Amino acid sequence: MREEYLDPDYLPNILPHREGEMGEAFELLKPLTSGKRPTNIFLHGPAGIGKTAVARFLMREFEKENVTGIYINGWYQRTEVAVLAEALRQLSYPVPRKGRSIDELVEDFFRNIEGENVVFVLDEVDALSEHNVLYVLSRAKVPIGVIMISNDPYAMRHLDQRVKSSLSPIDIEFKKYSVDELADILDERVKLAFHEYDSTAIKVAARLAFKHGSDVRYGLSLLLRAGRLARKMDQELGIEHVKSVDVKEDPKKEKRQGDLEGEHRVVVEAIKELGPDATSSAVFAKYREIGGKGAERTFRKYVKELIELQMVRAEDLPGRGKRRLLKVQI
Ligand code: ADP
Ligand code: MG
């Protein structure tokens, strides 16, 4: 078994069932290849469905056309300084992170991309603690295409108007894969990783991945663990191995992955509808408006449960009393 092909960070040469999204993104960014300013894009959709893979794939394609690629993940580089320092590192111009002002870093960055065409990926963009770096990008004199990525379809709404209007990205929504699509995707990876295997094992893995929110990453991890088990037993990879490594979820997790039911679902709908305006009190009003039945105390209980299930996140708003903003986490 060649485990590296089941590693989630391995970037395959083909991405089945993302041809549409990829083609659209490519067309919008294409002006870069002739030194013109392209249209920025915003990729969004739930976890494990190929957003990062598509962005990295595009970056690789554009690099072949002499476009400079920079990849930043907001989870790891949260501040403006961190993003700029990492970008400079990727431009082979490492700078000391200490003792340099933001203005100097911005200047260094602009100087280092002078004369170039740049594709700048900002993955997990909602994890950034500061958004000013987006503004910096929008001010660059050279052609830059920004690919922003988030699980949260509303991530862009939280940006201030100035940034939004200067970047004005086009939305590309990533939908969940079907079981058959998951099977195709997993099959490509398994073909690389195993000499021999029972192809019905892939179908089973695809079905289980589908149950886990259509998450390809989960499917890959199943197959990796199943493969190791089969090897240990000196057998060919088969259905039994896949089934036996499937994590038996606790009921809470199950709920998180599966479809939400009843009142919880109405709460989530209300939060989604309000987007950036989803303060707890507004969500309660909206929840009642769209058919929620609980009184305020019951509603608060639902919210608390959703937070425990990590389906919803609450952020305290600064100022004025104890207001909380609710956000759906997919
Ligand atoms: P996301 O960024 O949406 O959370 P990723 O792009 O990281 O998800 O995808 C998770 C894993 O699944 C990666 O290893 C990726 O290569 C793989 N993957 C997702 N979609 C496809 C696809 N259409 N074809 C091949 N591999 C895919
Ligand atoms: Mg990702």
Image: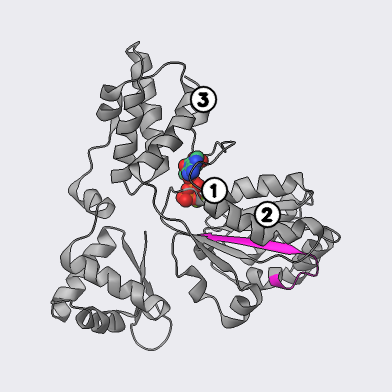
Q: Who is closer to the viewer here, 135 or 56?
A: 56
* Helix, strand or loop at mark 3: helix
Q: Secondary structure at mark 1?
A: helix
Residue for badge 2: 86
Tell me, for residue 327, which label it has, or none: none
Query: Would residue 99 appear left or right of 180 to someone viewing this image?
Result: right
Reply above or below: 155 against 218. Answer: below
* Mark pair 1, 2: CA separation: 30 Å
Q: Is residue 186 above or below residue 126?
A: above
Horizontal and vertical percent position of residue 46:
41, 55
Q: Is residue 177 magenta?
A: no
From the image, state whether disc 3 or disc 2 is nearer to you: 3
Other-residue count near label 1 (Cα within 10 Å), few / some / many at <14 / 14–19 / ≥20: few
Q: Amino acid at mark 3?
A: Leu
The residue that mark 1 highlights is 19
Mark pair 3, 2: CA separation: 33 Å
